[in-house]
Image (tube, rainbow, N blue to C red):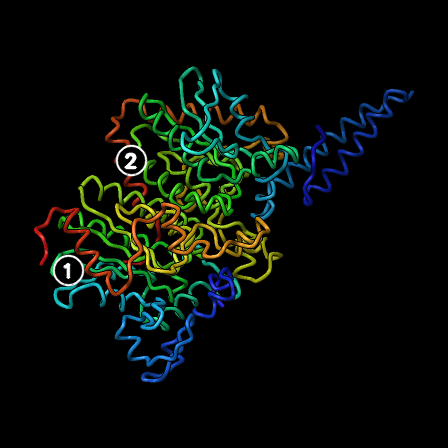
Amino acid sequence: MKTSFLDFEQPIAELEARIEELRYVQDDSALDISAEIKTLTAKSQKQTKDIYAKLGAWQISQVARHPQRPYTLDYLQGMFTHVEELHGDRAYADDPAIVGALARLNGEPVMVVGQQKGRDTKEKIYRNFGMPRPEGYRKALRLYRLAEKFGLPVITLIDTPGAYPGIGAEERGQSEAIARNLYVMAELRTPIVAVIIGEGGSGGALALGVADQMLMLQYGMYSVISPEGCASILWKSAEKAPDAAETLAITANRLKALGLIDRIINEPVGGAHRDPEGMMQSLRKALGETLKLFQGRSMDEIIQTRYERLMAYGKFKEAS
Amino acid sequence: MSWLQKLLPPKIKRTLGDTKKTVPEGLWSKCPTCESVLYRTDLEKNQEVCPKCGFHNRIGARARLDQVLDAEGRMEIGSEVTPLDPLKFKDSKSYAERIKASQKDTGETDALVVMQGSINTVPAVVAAFEFRFQGGSMGSVVGERFVRGVNACIDHKLPFICFAASGGARMQEGLFSLLQMAKTSAALTALSRAKLPFISVLTDPTMGGVSASFAMLGDVILAEPGALIGFAGPRVIEQTVRETLPDGFQRAEFLLEHGAVDLIVDRREMRDKLVKLISSLMRLPENG
């Protein structure tokens, strides 16, 4: 598949186009231009590295939403074995915007739950652009409980613009569905590890994000509101989204500095979509290490630590 | 215009705003729904409910607590906690300035007031949102005060009641605000383990991150008549689905019909209803 380039990647795009051209003519050219191709490729890689070394928050949010970025099902296939997808909330429907599966990570059985975006137009619509409805959150809840019952760690993969703002979603209790997940995840008697793999959009993301360990990919984003939404409300102009992105503190680096995530997983040069396999290797390793943290700890202790961590969220002044 | 006002359709917007400030005491007041002309003092005596049509006007946190709690033996919880600006947030105005302006307008230090006291002699902790403070939005202080209220209940074996009135999470504290949803919801797991009831009262409006966390986790959920309650704002939904929203969409009555709340309670009967529910849930002796 051809890489699609973001605006700020134009210099890379131009180099890549030139390389492509050379490769095309190389076959029927008498001259050996492979050295030239090699130089250009190195240059393109350096360019990519340089550009990605100084991405702003708004650019990072574009990478987080990159149409070729690996999604939950890609990770399920690439990082886990013995994958068995489980469907439905047992009450209303199966929401394709959230997928859940029994799977094995490095041989150990786990429950994986994540939002799923679509790749092409048809699949995007089928997955509702990764915006879950209440039945999606209720499916997730059912699978958390199932994992708890059989003592399987829960791994959530977060990638959503937000919970779906629709008529039916409201009728079926979108608020309650999200709230119930927050409540149950706080007291679930099995370890929970959450990973922001792409877009962490507000309450719709948080409903999968109450965890003992919070990991985040280097170019993921996690925010109380989308930069566009924030800009149109506070600046009265969606064009101010880059300013909003910067000030909202949505990037892995900012959130790590604020103490709101535990670990940043570095991405391959130029983002996860340029080397999905490399990305999965790093994440699989990090998840393995993270799950080891729970070994030898009692469930009571894990739950207590989780509770204290939740209670510590927030920054305020306190008069003595 | 506040960010929440922008979310609401024009019809609702008209009922917003600070009528108390613009209309001097003792003057006439026009009901926004039935258009009856009423004496302000009559309206106040009737707990800001229109005596003609029953329309529930929005009320502030202190007025709410005055209506619900007995006058004697009240103690405020969490007032020692006040807001910071952890992100140094700035749009057209800085967050610090916005906070100062809201503090001046409302006389409150943040959007939630929590008090321990009694309701018709039944001891309880009651929390009430001040919607005029940044649209009742939930940031770190709101979350912390909520938790301290819950903890006081656990320490003294009391029921917890919360009157929600909020546009959702407070954007200017970024992810700290979002995480208050998780924090407040988690606190309720501790209250549950102590077998103490949480009664959530949804008033106009209860939206976004507040609706999608503790507000929908009541052991019993009450709503005031006509209150707008939902996850997404009506305008956002309209823009997403490109359909006209059905009549009464996201109103308390709509939620009752869809099984999302237990009861709709008239404000003038709220106190009695709360006592009745708490007494039964906590197996207190019959009251009166």
Query: What secondary structure is marked by label 2?
Result: helix
Query: Against A37, is B136 above or below?
Result: below
Badge 2 density bin: few <14, some 14–19, many ≥20, Cα 10 Å? some
Contact between labelled residues 1 and 2, with CB atoms less than 8 Å apart: no
**Residue carrying label 1:** B118
Quadrant where the C terminus of chain A is found in the figure: bottom left
Mark 1 belongs to chain = B
Q: Circle 2 sits on which residue? A: A187
Q: Secondary structure at mark 1?
A: strand
User: Where is residue A238 shown, x and y percent of the image?
Assistant: 60, 56
**Above or below A86: residue B64:** below
Q: Nearer the viewer, mark 2 or mark 1?
A: 1
Q: CA distance from mark 2 to mark 1?
A: 30 Å
Viewed as shown, does residue A53 lie left or right of A110?
right
Q: Which of A239 and B188 lies nearest the eye of the viewer?
A: B188
Q: Is residue B69 above or below residue A148?
A: below
Residue type at mark 2 is Glu
Residue B169 appears anywhere in the view: no
Mark 1 is on which residue type?
Ser
